[in-house]
Amino acid sequence: MAGPVFDIPRDVILPVDTVDVVLDPAPHPFEVAHAEAIGQNWQSEIKARPALFDGEVVLLSEFGYAGRRLFGRCHAVRYATFMYWRKERAGTAAHAFAHPVLVASDNALVAIRMAAHTVNAGKVYFAAGSFEPEDFPGGRVDLHGNMAREVLEETGLDLDAALAGGLCHALSTDRGTVIFRRYHLDMTADEIAARIEGFVAGESEPEISGPVIIRDATDLPDGLMPHMRPLIDWHFGSEGG
């Protein structure tokens, strides 16, 4: 039997017209092959962060890019499986996630800093979360649906009220693939940040500690995730402008 195929250029921003990723109901081979190690690792993870929840996310078993099209196959797995894969980076699975790039009316970007009880505590990136089985209505990924849900859960903002950019892009690195798209909000960065701060203050256990405004390509906050720098440069540079 042929092994998994992951054929996507690395470390370059790619234009994407179509995202055609399907959800396969079969178990992911990685989860089946490493069940015991996944369980052992999960016990270590929850000992360090008791708030972690072993829900369902998805991991890819195939992923590629051709003709401005992203295509692939993924499977529902335990969050524990994703955490073990994240540590091992085994070549039999891959991870993709979506980033709604929130653009204020003054062209600043609004990201978030993750709360202390989360896996990425203190890290800064655009409001986002892993794809879940519910993001595959009809068996194919709903990119906007995933982004809208995550933005609402983390910031209280309604992404459907924003003006979506006309084109998606993708950036693949050895840490995973981020699929991103601009969403323009009719508010200044300070107004957006105030909205998010108000939402966070009203949550009993917020996923984020608060908003982070990025006003230009040199205005980089502490804790910025490595994949964010190319996206910020792209937005403020001539290519992304």
Image (cartoon, rainbow, N blue to C red):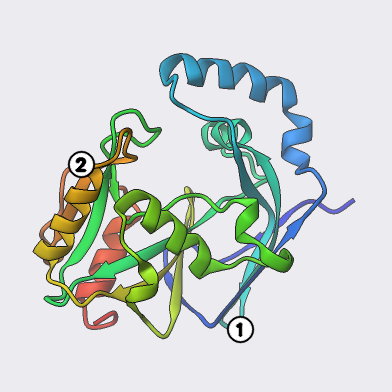
The secondary element bearing badge 2 is classed as: helix
Question: From where the camera sits, is residue 9 visible?
Answer: no
Which residue is outermost to the right?
Answer: 1
Left or right: residue 232 versus residue 205 is left
Is 44 drawn above or below residue 94 in the view shown? above
Outermost residue, front side: 202
- Viewer-side residue, 49 vs 233: 49
Q: Which mark is residue 201?
A: 2
Residue 187 vertical position relative to residue 178 in the rendered view, above or below: below
Give the camera-side residue of 38 and 161.
161
Mark 1 lies on a secondary structure that is loop
The quadrant of the picture occupied by the C terminus is bottom left
Asked if residue 113 is positioned above or below residue 159 in the image, the reply reads above
Q: Position of residue 225 (x, y in %)?
A: 31, 47
Q: Amino acid at mark 2?
A: Ala
Q: What residue is rendered at 32% in x and 76% in y? A: 162
Res 116 label: none
Residue on which the image places disc 1: 67
Q: Label 2 neighbourhood size at 10 Å, few (<14), some (14-19), many (20+)? A: few
Question: Residue drawn at (56%, 53%), measured in percent from left and top?
Answer: 131
| Cβ atoms under marks 2 and 1 closer than 8 Å | no
Near-viewer residue (171 or 160): 160
Residue 113 position within the rendered picture, expressed as x and y whole percent measured from the top left: 25, 44
